[in-house]
Amino acid sequence: MLRHDLHSTDNRHMRGIMRILPGIMLGVWLSLSAQAQTTFQGSVYLLAGIPQGAFRANVDNAGFGLDFDVGWRFQHAPLFLGAELGFMIYGVERRKEPFSMTIPDVTVDVETVNNMAMGHLVMRVQPALGRLWPFVEGLAGGRYFYTRTSIESEQQEEIAASTNYEDVALSYGYGGGVEIELYQKATPRRRQRLLLHVGGRYLYGSEAEYLRKGSIRRVNGRVFYDVYRSRTNVLIWRLGLTFHF
């Protein structure tokens, strides 16, 4: 009972943060947009994620994926407001199986992938110091854990697929890093820029149920899932490119 109460309290705190942050972002955007022009910004990143705490006790390997964010930068204030979408693969298993019991001489590739998709609202404070753009940021949103198994032909064409297990978790955190200006071009209204992004984030995650590599067992034609449940904290490192339009 105590464990359940503690997790319920944590989830209430996370929901509170997620309710507050969009309101703060909207208020800041409305107050500044009346005074300053905005510049559209988009970024693409490679990411590596390292599970933390109880999540790491269950998933002891790093995950890799892609991340994207878009939003608005205020030209006369060191502030970026936007949204982020990304995904990370934290386990892959591949094996060959007969196409069917009656056609054992034809085999197919079976692939099981453990995935974590994520989406957050992002508020970033980022002054320009010459060609260096250091930043700190806060973010809140959610994550979607799912394990998917697919059958592929020798030509890598998907024949069939199924989602084995799925769950969602609330997510919030903070981060920091630096962007290095690689290129800029002045236009009549603004400066266009290309920057190299190097940064890290620590994301706190509520409890979720998920599978890991080796969680799916097949015994005498039946399938059994070893399901894990924990908080889903993760440390993420990102390397990418940012564009100011």
Image: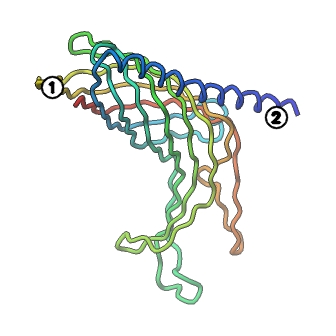
Above or below, 222 against 21 in this view is below
Residue annotated with mark 1: 183
Mark 2: amino acid: His
Above or below, 150 against 225 in this view is below
Quadrant position of the C terminus in the picture? top left
Sequence-wise first label, 2 or 1: 2
Disc 2 packing (10 Å; few <14; some 14–19; many ≥20): few
Disc sitting over residue 4 in the figure: 2
Question: The residue tagged with tag 1: helix, strand or loop?
Answer: strand
How has the structure been colored for display? rainbow
Q: Nearer the viewer, residue 109 or 188?
A: 188
Above or below, 81 against 223 in this view is above
Question: The residue tagged with tag 2: helix, strand or loop?
Answer: helix
The total of numbered circles placed on residues is 2
Furthest residue in direction top, as rendered = 129
Mark 1: amino acid: Tyr
Query: From mark 2 to mark 1, how far is it between C-alphas?
Result: 52 Å
Quadrant assignment, res 158? bottom left
Q: Position of residue 221 (x, y in %)?
A: 69, 75
